[in-house]
Image (cartoon, rainbow, N blue to C red):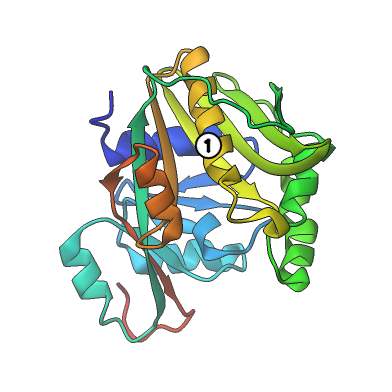
Amino acid sequence: MTGIAFREMLDAHCLMQSGCYVSDVETAPDGGRYLWSAAIPEPGFNVGVETTDLSWVRAASAKRERLPALLVTEDRDRERLGTHPDLQAAFPTRWMVRDCRQAQTPVMPGGLTLAAEAKAAPGEAYLSVCRGLYDDEGVNAIAEAVFLPVLREARPVEGVEAHHLTVSEDGVPVACASLYRSGGLAGLYNVGSLASRRGRGLGALVTRAAIETARQEGAETVMLQCVAGGHVERLYAGLGFTVAASPTLMVFSHGGAFAG
């Protein structure tokens, strides 16, 4: 099932995150969509997909006091929009997949334990990891104020199973990951480890545990999203994930030099 089209992954993402990060989806005149988050202002959570109608996306984002952003999949659209005078930034991304049917249970090294929660919202042990993902305490404070309330208030979604995994060392939570399954496809989200424990393979360990959870729950394929070209992509490639799509997140100002 790893030969998955981008639209199938996008549909699954919208469904899986409709109880958490995706507050609503608005349909564009050309059939595209605008995904938005009521709580998280970052462009990656408030973005036009399957559309290049920048005028419409501008209007949709302005209603929600968000910067206009597009997730662009076609080279010709990247080239055209790349010269737009209102373009502020462009971030290449990867949507990656891995067959999980042959996954095996990872061996937990001594002193490490794995806890799993099968519910919409993760518990406090998981959230404690999210509070310490960054070396910069200012960034951790933003995560505490913006992202953690969204996770804490996540709602069940019909047709989606949520599993939140926490790895602890000697009783202290040190790494986390979330897995959302719908049918044969599972989505991997929120993978991270405490900044103070980075470089010890904890992210890879909790990812392997999530892949095995997906297999146990009946999924055939795990998908994820990450920034292109960095250590995170290399980590996932080393764990058997391959690139299924490479959309670019393009962020624009609210100006109007020309429409689209």
Q: Position of residue 24 (x, y in %)?
A: 57, 44
Label 1 crowd (10 A; few <14 / some 14-19 / many >=20): many
Q: Position of residue 6 (x, y in %)?
A: 29, 41
Q: Position of residue 236 (x, y in %)?
A: 41, 45
Residue 61: in sight, yes or no? Answer: yes
Look at mark 1 in the image and give the residue it sits on. 207
Residue 22: in sight, yes or no? Answer: no
| Image side of residue 95 versus residue 196, left or right | left
Q: Residue at x 77, y 70 (%)?
A: 137
Q: Nearer the viewer, residue 133 or 83?
A: 133
Q: Residue at x 74, y 48 (%)?
A: 129
| Image side of residue 58 versus residue 150, left or right | left
- The C terminus - image quarter: bottom left
Q: Nearer the viewer, residue 156 or 115?
A: 115
User: Residue 174: which quarter of the image?
Assistant: top right
Q: Nearer the viewer, residue 231 or 156?
A: 231
Looking at numbered disc 1 in the image, what kind of residue is underneath it? Thr
Q: Does residue 257 sit above or below 110 in this rendering? A: below
Q: Residue at x 64, y 35 (%)?
A: 19
User: Residue 220: which quarter of the image?
Assistant: top left
- The N terminus - image quarter: top left
| Image side of residue 113 versus residue 15, left or right | right
